[in-house]
Amino acid sequence: MLTEKRCEKRCEYCAWADKTAGGDMLCYYHGPVDKDNSCRKYKYDPFKRVPERPAELKKTEIETL
């Protein structure tokens, strides 16, 4: 979750890795790797995180009138 202080180390969120067409990651240091992989060169990039959609609020009867 975005509000957590520490997130799971995954190449999917690393600044040194980019997505490939096959769904894996291409690491600057290690070449093609799995997106769940991580290494010592891991550097968190917050812009690679995709936040979950917030839950929809239920409308009350008063709002619908």
Image (cartoon, helix red, strand yellow):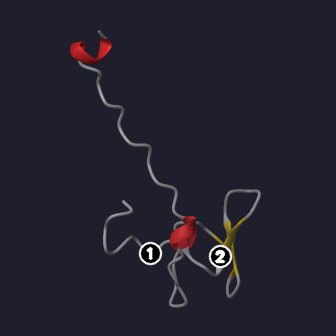
Place of residue 43 in the rendered image (x, y in percent of width and height, measured from the top left): 52, 84
| Corner quadrant of residue 54 | top left
In this view, 47 is above or below 28? above
Q: Quarter of the image containing the N terminus?
A: bottom left
Report the residue that reaches farthest toward the right. Answer: 21
Which residue is the site of mark 2? 17
Sequence-wise, the earlier of marks 2 and 1 is 1
Q: Which type of secondary structure does the marked residue at label 2 adopt? A: strand
Q: Quarter of the image containing the C terminus?
A: top left
In the picture, measured across the screen, residue 64 lies left or right of residue 49, that is left
In the picture, measured across the screen, residue 38 lies left or right of residue 58, that is right
Place of residue 28 in the rendered image (x, y in percent of width and height, measured from the top left): 71, 84
Place of residue 40 in the rendered image (x, y in percent of width and height, measured from the top left): 50, 90
| Corner quadrant of residue 15 | bottom right
For the point 46% across and 54% down, the residue is: 51
Which residue is the site of mark 1? 9
Q: How many marks?
A: 2
For the point 52% across and 84% down, the residue is: 42
Report the residue that reaches farthest toward the top. Answer: 65
9 or 50: nearer the viewer = 50
56 or 1: nearer the viewer = 56
What amino acid is labelled 2 in the image?
Ala
For the point 44% across and 75% down, the residue is: 9
For the point 31% across and 74% down, the residue is: 5
Instruction: Rate crowding at label 2 as few (under 14), some (14 to 19) or many (20 or more) other CA atoms within 10 Å.
Output: many
Q: Which type of secondary structure does the marked residue at label 1 adopt? A: loop
In the picture, measured across the screen, residue 8 lies left or right of residue 57, that is right
